[in-house]
């Protein structure tokens, strides 16, 4: 079982809609959770991080963490064409080696 | 500040050739990492250096060696390149190896092995 699993996508949403991205992880002792955005041909850039159960909001982005269910999600509200990218979920498990999911590609239709 | 700088940006090698990928950061970070990214597989950790003078294997270390030359620089060497090492390589750094440290990435090196 991979340490970090993401819904495979691709995910296509109309402009202005909510894009919902899901991620599950296998190491129950994981402490830190990150969402990176990666545009085609570019390097990953950090958009959100969350350490505690519950919701964390930053502009149009909301990260949700449920450690009991080993689940972290990212919501993108009012999706814009500029949000079209691959979103990578990353988790720091007990061994402190950051582990990435395969990514979910999001396309926002104008 | 440049952040994390990788050289070269592109490289084509023949099978069996050797090559060193260079990475330097100017953020005074202690920890540095090398990843490879292949389609559909996300980023996989090759080697990391928690601090100057230390290196450790990641998920996919076979066929690679690393050197933490000083606090700023962390190089990745392919001694005998194989087509399976065709990939995009990213270097990253963090202030330290703690659990709440986001990674700062370089722009990547696109490597093709023929």
Image (spheres, grey):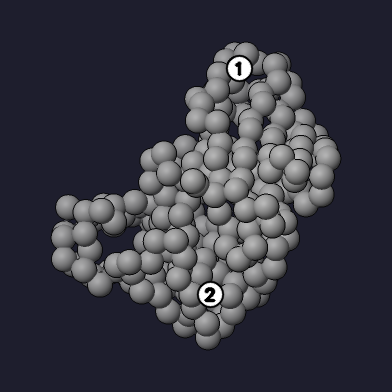
Q: In the image shown, does A43 or A6 lie closer to the viewer? A: A6
In the rendered image of this protein, does residue A45 appear above or below residue A78? below
Residue under the point 67% across and 48% down? A34
- Residue A55: mark in rendering: none
Q: Is residue A9 left or right of residue A32?
A: left
Subunit that carries the residue with mark 2: B
Which label was assigned to residue A13? 1
**Image quarter hosting the N terminus of chain B:** bottom right
Q: Secondary structure at mark 2?
A: strand
Real-space CA distance between mark 2 and mark 1, rounded to the nearest whole angstrom: 40 Å
**Lateral position of residue B39 relative to residue B93, left or right:** left
On the same chain: label 2 and label 1? no
Question: Would residue B112 be visible to someone looking at this image?
Answer: yes
> Within the image, what quadrant is residue B18 found in?
bottom left
Mark 2 sits on what residue? B49
- Please indicate whether residue A82 sits to the left or right of residue B98 in the image: left
Q: Is residue B108 visible?
A: no
């Amino acid at each position: 079982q991979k340490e970090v699993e993401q819904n495979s996508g691709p995910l296509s949403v109309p402009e202005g809609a909510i894009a919902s991205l899901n991620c599950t992880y296998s190491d129950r002792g994981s402490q830190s959770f990150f969402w990176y955005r990666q545009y085609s041909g570019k390097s990953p850039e950090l958009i959100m991080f969350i350490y505690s159960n519950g919701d964390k909001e930053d502009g149009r982005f909301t990260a949700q963490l449920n450690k009991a269910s080993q689940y972290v999600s990212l919501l993108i509200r009012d999706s814009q064409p500029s949000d079209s990218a691959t979103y990578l979920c990353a988790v720091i498990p007990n061994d402190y080696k950051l582990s990435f999911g395969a990514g979910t590609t999001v396309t926002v239709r104008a | 500040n440049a952040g994390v700088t990788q050289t070269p940006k592109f490289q084509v090698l023949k099978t069996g050739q050797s090559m060193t990928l260079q990475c330097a950061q100017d953020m005074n970070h202690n920890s540095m990492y090398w990843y490879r990214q292949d389609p559909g597989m996300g980023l996989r950790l090759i080697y990391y250096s928690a601090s100057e003078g230390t290196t450790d294997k990641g998920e996919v270390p076979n066929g690679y060696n690393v050197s933490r030359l000083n606090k700023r620089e962390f190089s990745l060497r392919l001694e005998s390149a194989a087509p399976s090492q065709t990939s995009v390589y990213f270097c990253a750094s963090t202030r330290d190896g703690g659990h709440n440290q986001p990674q700062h990435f370089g722009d990547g090196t696109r490597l093709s092995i023929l």
